Image (cartoon, rainbow, N blue to C red):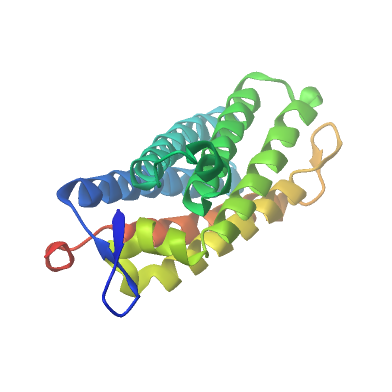
Amino acid sequence: MSTSASTSGAVTPHVSRRDAWLLRLMSLGFGIGSFLFGLGAVLAMIGTPVPTADEIFVVGAICFTFAAAVQLLSAIQHAPTGPRLLRHVLTDPDLVSSTIQLIGTLYFNVMTVRALLLPMTEYGAVWRPDVYGSVCFLLSSWIAWHPVVRLRRYGLVITRSSVILWANMLGSIFFAVSAWGATLIRPGTFENSLWANLGTLLGAIGFLIAAVLVWPTPSEEG
């Protein structure tokens, strides 16, 4: 979303159809991914065979990566251009937040695929990318509070941006709690199996709420 300065010096967003389309793609990707992660957590808690839950997590992680890629594409399209392009790439909060978010989803892809394929005795290879992905989500959610990110990413739904940011932050926190709970003490035993699944469920709910609120209404498109 491009921006310009008004006569009073305030920055106001200019919204295009492309911006609304990108928001819808992000909403769908994060929304479907969140739903699948929540469903996988519920199935794991009620004792559904592990491969079923793990397969759902794999698809959910792919949806997250798709949405994060769209988010980064939007940030690239709206980033400042000019002779200091490299500096903008390294310092622009929208680009930095979106890049970290995409890296986090890629870690979740690695984590979910390894959980599906590797035996429990090799769970450390699953837990590490889970932790790295959770840290990336936390960092990305924190940077997203920057006014520039709020304006560009959520300018079309700016009245809901605070709720979106809080929902994403809480989702990131609960995913981190889930990663802690999934620490393997010995083969087949987690640090806290309840929080390994409950953290995933609550995190998924937070991300789902944010995804739903990102979807722009016809009136907001003007």
> Picture coordinates of residue 144 (x, y %)?
51, 59
Who's the residue at 81% across and 24% down the image? 121
Who's the residue at 74% across and 44% down the image? 182
Identity of the residue furthest to the bottom in this view: 8
Which one is in front, 197 or 96?
Answer: 96
Lateral position of residue 216 relative to residue 200, left or right: left
Query: Is 200 located above or below residue 212 in the figure?
Result: above
Which one is in front, 92 or 82?
Answer: 82
Q: Quadrant of residue 44?
A: top right
Lateral position of residue 93 relative to residue 124, left or right: left
> Picture coordinates of residue 105 (x, y %)?
54, 37
Q: Quadrant of residue 10?
A: bottom left
> Picture coordinates of residue 15 (x, y %)?
21, 57
Q: Is residue 100 visible?
A: yes
Who's the residue at 37% across and 56% down the image? 153
Query: Is 124 located above or below residue 212 in the figure?
Result: above
Who's the residue at 63% across and 45% down the image? 136
> Picture coordinates of residue 1 (x, y %)?
30, 53
Identity of the residue furthest to the right in this view: 186
Identity of the residue furthest to the front in this view: 83
Which one is in front, 107 or 154?
Answer: 154
Query: Where is the C terminus found, in terms of image quarters?
Result: bottom left
Q: Is residue 49 visible?
A: no
Q: Quadrant of residue 129?
A: top right
Lateral position of residue 222 relative to residue 107, left or right: left
Which one is in front, 133 or 32?
Answer: 133
Query: Is 99 located above or below residue 191 in the figure?
Result: above
